[in-house]
Amino acid sequence: MSAQKPPPPQDQRPSPLKRPRSPSPAAEASSKKPAPSFPAVAQAKSQTLKFTISGPAARFQYLRIRITHARPGNATALNELHFRSAINHALRETFGLIGASHHVDLLKFDAARQEGLVRTPYASCPTLRAALTLMREYQNNELRADVLDSSPFLFSIAHNSRVWKPVQERK
Amino acid sequence: MVRFKNRFLLFRLHYNDDPPAGPASSRHAALIDPVIHGGNISSAVKESILLNFGDYGAGIAATSTAVKYFSPWTNTGVLRCARDHFELVWAALTFVTQLKGKSCTFRVVHVGGTIKSVQQETLDLDRRLLGDIQKLGLVTAHQSADLLAKAREEIAAIDV
């Protein structure tokens, strides 16, 4: 049995306050050591960049509208004239004669898909969309209108990246 | 507490049909139709709102629109409507062109936000027009006084 050194008497042990401790950050800061140098990129503060693109006010809003019938068939399918008349009917029902006076031009119509490309002044777009949303029948046939696309730029309606595929992939 | 703000439109009704030839009194008499009452005008205005402004207009304005006073002798009346859409109601009133088969025009002569202001204007207008009718000899002084008293009573009874 090895002889262990007896602990020093209580009054001779070093005070807990004076025992060496791990260095604190405050102590390090005041220790006059040079701060570690970080690379310049990491030191830059994050910034929020804001870009504003402005141009002349849009004159027209272009909408691609599709009409879906409750009972699809040749009897209920609309031609160009009836498609435009259905839009007029929707405006008149919801907003009256004043609402029906909003300019709406049918630029293109696909009878097979019952889709039309419509142009309206930019300020009339909310009125037209509200009327189309509330349309539920035309000439006693139940139907609904969906706005597939809406943009003040006609070019952006030409193609949709979700639908369009490059020529190579199509083959 | 949300307070409902109103607008009171004081209007005059003018008939457009050519009055029959003759003295001024008979011409004026042809333009007085005691059968017309406020309910006729109220339903005409609501139909006009529905026709010209659709379901949207009827939803926001028609329920708060009511004729509070109408005198078929002076063809003046007071229409109450909500403050937010009083211009829509004013336009619909202007678009009313026929009343009980007769071609007519409505003209708004005063717009007030409080009952008191419109009551005073209505009373002044009715007093002046009843005086004109009396001068034309359509009513006697006694009848004119009775009509004025009746008008004063009905105007004082205008309520929100």
Image (tube, rainbow, N blue to C red):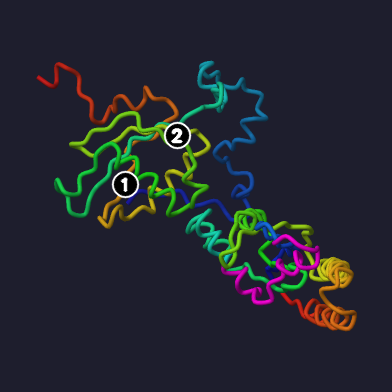
Q: CA distance from mark 2 to mark 1?
A: 16 Å
Q: Is residue A43 above or below residue B39?
A: above
The residue sitting at the left extreme is A171
Q: Is residue B45 visible?
A: no
- Foreground residue, B78 or B13? B13
Residue highlighted by disc 2: A120
Q: Position of residue B34 (x, y in %)?
A: 69, 76
* Image quadrant assignment for residue B92: bottom right
Looking at the picture, tell me which residue is in the foreground, A65 or B2. Answer: A65
Badge 1 amino acid? Ala
The one of B42 and B36 positioned closer to us in this rendering: B36
Bounds of the magenta segment: B20-43
Specify whether residue B40 is painted magenta.
Answer: yes
Chain letter for mark 1: A
Local packing at callout 2 (Cα closer than 10 Å; few below 14, some 14-19, many 20+) is: some
Give the side of residue B33 with respect to residue A89, left or right. right
In the rendering, at what x and y percent does residue B37 appear? 65, 75
Question: Residue flagged by tag 2: what amino acid is it?
Answer: Thr
The answer to whether residue A39 is visible is yes
Q: Is residue B135 above or below residue A125?
A: below
> How far from the left and from the top, in percent, is residue A46?
54, 27
Residue pointed to by mark 1: A145
Q: How many marks?
A: 2
Residue at (54% x, 38% y) in the render: A22
**Number of the label disc, if any, that sits on residue A42:** none
